[in-house]
Amino acid sequence: MAISFQQAAAMALDSVQIGFLPPAAHVTADNVLQLVPYAQSKGFDFIIAPINSPAYRRVLFENEGRLSPAMLAWRAGMEALRPEDLVLRTADRSEAIVGTLSDWQDFDSQDPKVRLHSELALRQQFTWAAHLGLGGVILPYPPSSRPLTNYSRVLTGTLSMIPYTVCWLRVPCMDNDLEKDVAEELQGMKSWERWNILRNMAGSDSKLGVALELSSTLPTDQVLDRWFAEPVKVIILHEDIFLTNNRGYPVLSKRHQHVVRMFFKFKPYFIISSPTMPKLVLDEFSDDVLEESLASPHADYIRYLYRTQDAPGVIDQFATGYQDYLQAPLQPLQDNLDSSTYETFEKDPIKYQQYELAIERALRDRPFPNGGTPDVTVITVVGAGRGPLVNCSLRAAEKAGRNVRIYAVEKNPNAFVTIQNMKAAQWGDRVNIVFSDMRTWKAPEQADILVSELLGSFGDNELSPECLDGAQKVLKLDGISIPANYTAFVAPMSSNKLHADVSGYKDLARFETSYVVMFKTVSLLAQPKPIWVFEHPNRTDIPLDQDPLSNHHNIRSGSVEFTSETSGMVHGVAGYFESVLYKDVILSINPATHSSGMFSWFPIYFPIRTPLYIPAGAQVVLDFWRLTDKRKVWYEWRVSCKVKGLGEIQWSALHNVGGRSSSIGLY
Ligand SMILES: C[S@@+](CC[C@H](N)C(=O)[O-])C[C@H]1O[C@@H](n2cnc3c(N)ncnc32)[C@H](O)[C@@H]1O
């Protein structure tokens, strides 16, 4: 038995579902049911067929008046679709069929009759598709060159008629020059813009997705990238975009392969569109012939690409279940982390490796105390958690051949139990454990090296600056802080999905809160840029060996400008950090310099209430502030769009004024 789309979606986790799209004109009520087993014998999972026959066009001609009698009767519930109107007449095999609309339907036609009948026909088609239980419906790329406002309105009003059927808008994806020519005919609007209008009017209904039709020449990466932030549920490949390899089999160009592989992570359905109708179905059809027919080499090839994807890396494996999931950032100063949180980041293969290397290098560079006598170097680990950085310090000392005395300071009483056990079982006298807030601890001796890991996804958002300002008085004047600095990075980002998820809370404050998210359905409009830096130790603002007088020196602000090469929507700001632990040993989650294989930090997402549309070539300006009072630290942000000669043409509200919706507690 054929699998349903729901089952297919569940299975799609480890396989790829492929549909067969023959020329609509050849698919009839007589052959459509043969086409399903034929396609399945060729290795396809489903077929694409028109819902209605060409005869259905009659509704346009039946009456010179505004509405045809058939439509009037149907509207009044008095007439059903006639059998001759339909290609899909029964629910047989409907779970393996995706329907398409009629080619005369044009929702934005200049002819009011065509507009009205297209809409009424869509209602009939949706009602019928829902009745049959079709797997999905593919909507045509808007044929008319007029704006899509009526198409969008019609669709928005009718999607609720198909509660269990998904709907995909067919959108061409072609190279920039070709698209420009086509766009000129379509009043300058390119395919993404047209989809964007429709999607925005339909209010990001989760039933509505994109069936992206890849052409033989593809657009630039920048243009393609926008589609990774959209609900691309189907990839359509025409047989004629395949090349033929020297063994005579169809293959895709390197670039197409790359793009197809990029889309695999979104688990789309694939559709192979064939320019010819299978002869077997047109002529006569028997089970014997079925058994003899060979698998489609095109479908085989897509399955081959799917099977030969790179094995998921450490990050991908770790990310399963976290992708596009909004999490509140940790507040390790105000809250006490639980054991599972420590356990998760202790699994990171890279973070501790980098810390160990940084500590080893710092130890090697550090002159021997007492003028060259191999004496003891003091390492103080502040915010020791369950002890992994103490272990890094011990291993680094071993490698560098230095004697060390370690202090491990932690304020979480639960984590402190673990380090008490560690001392008893493993560390012994080499490590002194201290239960204290690092900001108020009075150290028995000054440290040569101060080690901490208090970093958040935005660098300073877990209050590392404030904690280290208090802790640095335990560091010798010429002592080394690991990390030495961290820089926050920002980029304008597009993600309809994340924005819709924040909207789902129906609470304004949720738009003034940042979220830690493993990005999936996200695209950046430009590469991230630095916005501010924190350096440690901070001998400039903090009196020698004393506590900071106020927290004003930790206020930051920045305004960063980006040029967007393509048009796009900004749904907020993506934040990242880079940190120099010691000299050239760094930790980074900035995409350009990401520490490969490190998964301790996901990017941070600062949403904006109302997304901004950015025309190609316009400037996006991100304004950020890090502000503080005696009890808390918070961020405020604003996004605006500038166009040469016009100045600011759009701007968001200033978000989180005075930390009214979100802040990070200092106590
Ligand atoms: C991100 S965790 C890092 C834990 C551990 N060093 C690691 O790398 O696995 C930060 C740790 O610092 C501790 N911490 C945060 N602020 C502190 C403070 N002011 N004084 C002492 N410990 C603090 C937290 O309780 C937490 O255990």
Image (cartoon, rainbow, N blue to C red):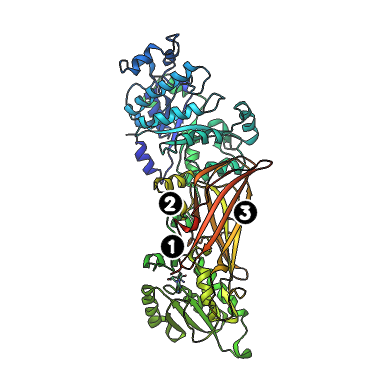
Q: CA distance from mark 3 to mark 2?
A: 24 Å
Badge number at residue 330: 1
Residue 404 place in picture, x, y as percent: 52, 84
- Residue designated by label 3: 560
What SS does tag 3 mark?
strand
Q: Secondary structure at mark 1?
A: loop
Marks 1,2: beta carbons within 8 A: no
Q: The disc labelled 2 sits on which kind of residue?
A: Arg
Marks 1 and 2, Cα distance to the nearest angstrom? 16 Å
Residue 471's place in the image compared with 6, above or below, is: below
Name the residue tied to disc 2: 510
Mark 1 or mark 2: whose residue is earlier in sequence:
1
Query: Is the residue indicated by label 1 positioned so its CB lies within 8 Å of ligand 1?
Result: yes
Callout 3 amino acid: Val
Q: Position of residue 602 (x, y in %)?
A: 49, 57
Q: Nearer the viewer, mark 1 or mark 2?
A: 2
Q: Earlier in the sequence, mark 3 or mark 2?
A: 2
